[in-house]
Structure formats: C-alpha cells, structure tokens
Image (cartoon, helix red, strand yellow):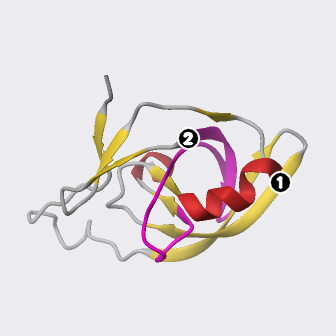
Amino acid sequence: NSDVFDLYSVSTRVATAQASTPFVQNIMFHSGGSRFETRCLVDHGAMTGGIRLSFWEKMKDTMEGWTTTDVVLRMVNGAREKSRARWVGTVSMGGFKAQGCFEVFDSSDEWDILVGKPLLQ
C-alpha cells in the first residue's frame, strides 16, 4: 500500500505578494561526521524535498541515514514516480540549519536537489 503525495502545489489564486520565482542556492547535507555540499533549486511550489535519482547514485555512499519508502510522488503533469529512498537529516543553507526530508526519484535534469515548502517554513 503506497501513499501518493503531490510533488507540487499549483494554484491559480496565489496573490502576487506570495508568488515566488525558483532560484539556485548552495546547500550542505550533514551526515554523521561528514558533509556534502552542492547546489539546489529552491521552489516554494514543491511540497517536499527531492534528490534526482542519477545524482543520488553519486552521493549515496558518502552519506548515512538513507531509508526505504513506499511514497509515490504525483508530478504536476499527473505522472506518478515511486520514491526510491528517503534521507532525513540536517542541512544548512543561506545561513540557517534545519531538519530536512528528501525523496529520491527519477526526475528531469533541471536540478539535482530540490528544496520545497517543508524546509522553507
């Protein structure tokens, strides 16, 4: 039994003051005694954090804390993509540290790491 989770929230009634444009930012993952730094896409429309599957293949052995998950992500176009793994832990970005949750799934090459609403709140 899988949970289906909408990756993006789309609303045509968003006030101009609340609308935001996605932007690129440095992010550091803290895992045990190691750290992994890269660039991420920050998007207020994303309902969770994401890690592109092909990028995860490069970073998975440098970090601890990967778990399996039954989550299925529903993309903005309605397509469904199973999350292959999940990482929950501390990240630092833009001068702050926070707990983040990132689902690993096969996505486009537009980003390696996606930061969404839960980490931005």
Residue 96, quarter of picture? bottom right
On the picture, is 82 further left or further right than 100?
Answer: left
Q: Secondary structure at mark 1?
A: strand
Q: How far across and down, in percent of the image, does residue 62 sit? A: 82, 51
On the picture, is 60 further left or further right than 120?
Answer: right
The residue at 67%/57% (across/down) is: 57
Please say if 13 is above or below 70.
Answer: below
Q: Residue furthest top?
A: 1
The residue at 87%/49% (across/down) is: 34
Residue corresponding to mark 1: 35
**Residue in the foreground of this view, choosing between 105 and 44:** 105
Disc 2 crowd rating (10 Å Cα; few below 14, some 14-19, many 20+) is some
Residue corresponding to mark 2: 85
Residue 16, quarter of picture? bottom left
Q: How far across and down, in percent of the image, does residue 8 sit? A: 28, 56
Q: Which residues are magenta?
A: 85-113
On the picture, is 85 further left or further right than 79?
Answer: right
The residue at 79%/49% (across/down) is: 61
Is 108 covered by the magenta stretch? yes
Nearer the viewer's eye, disc 1 or disc 2?
2
Most common secondary structure along the magenta stretch = strand
